[in-house]
Amino acid sequence: MRRLATLFLLAVMAAAAIGLYQVKHNAKDLAEENDRIAARIDRTRNNIAVLQAEWSNLNDPARIQSLAQRHLGLGSLDLNQIANASDIPMRAIPKAPLNKAQLEMLIEDTITTTGSTGGSR
């Protein structure tokens, strides 16, 4: 009976040692993966900081104004170019839709005026 108990305990200890080795190996793999992810996060944060600095430089109003004047020929805004919304004319009220005879007459007039059937290809 004593030998059976000893063999059983040895088997349990061997199984525990194998299990402990596997857990240690898995923990080591996870720690390495964690380090890789942390390094990737740091690189990404550095890239974001660089991009934010570039964005800030590209959106500098003085730089944009200089580029607009150089490449677009734009000048400063005059006061007479500013209008109120009330100065904009209202859209005309749409007419009733054309019936078939009016539409055909309009098409015929367009063809006779342009001398073609709608365009060249």
Image (tube, rainbow, N blue to C red):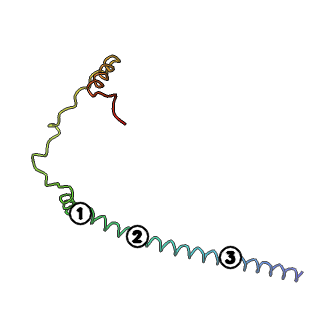
30 to the left or right of 103: right
Question: Which amino acid type is marked by label 2?
Answer: Arg
The picture quadrant where one finds residue 45 is bottom left
The residue located at (38%, 67%) in the rendering is 48
Say above or below: 66 vs 90: below
Tell whether 19 sits left or right of 49: right
Mark 3 and 2 residues: CB-CB less than 8 Å, in contact? no
User: Alpha carbon of mark 3 to alpha carbon of mark 2: how far?
Assistant: 34 Å
Residues at circles 1 and 2 in contact by the CB criterion of under 8 Å:
no
- Number of the front mark, 1 or 2: 1
Please state which amino acid type lies under the numbered disc 1. Asp
Q: Is residue 7 above or below residue 63?
A: below
Earlier-in-chain disc, 1 versus 2? 2
The residue that mark 2 highlights is 45
Q: Is residue 26 left or right of residue 69?
A: right
Q: Nearer the viewer, mark 3 or mark 2?
A: 2
Residue 95 lies, in percent from the top left, at: 26, 23
Image spot of residue 121 (x, y percent): 37, 37
The type of residue carrying mark 3 is Gln
Calculate the distance from the C-alpha at mark 3 to the C-alpha at mark 1. Answer: 57 Å
Using the numbered discs, state the Cα–Cα distance from disc 1 to disc 2 in whole angstroms. Answer: 23 Å
Q: Residue 22 versus residue 108: which sits nearer the camera?
A: 108
Ranked by sequence position, the earlier of labels 3 and 2 is 3
Please tell me which residue lies in front, 25 or 109.
109
Q: Residues within 10 Å of mark 2 (few under 14, many from 20)?
A: few
Residue highlighted by disc 1: 60
Q: How many marks?
A: 3
Dividing the image into 4 quarters, which one contains the N terminus? bottom right
Name the residue beneath numbered marker 3: 22
> Circle 1: is it few (<14), some (14-19), or many (20+) Cα within 10 Å?
few
Secondary element at image label 3: helix
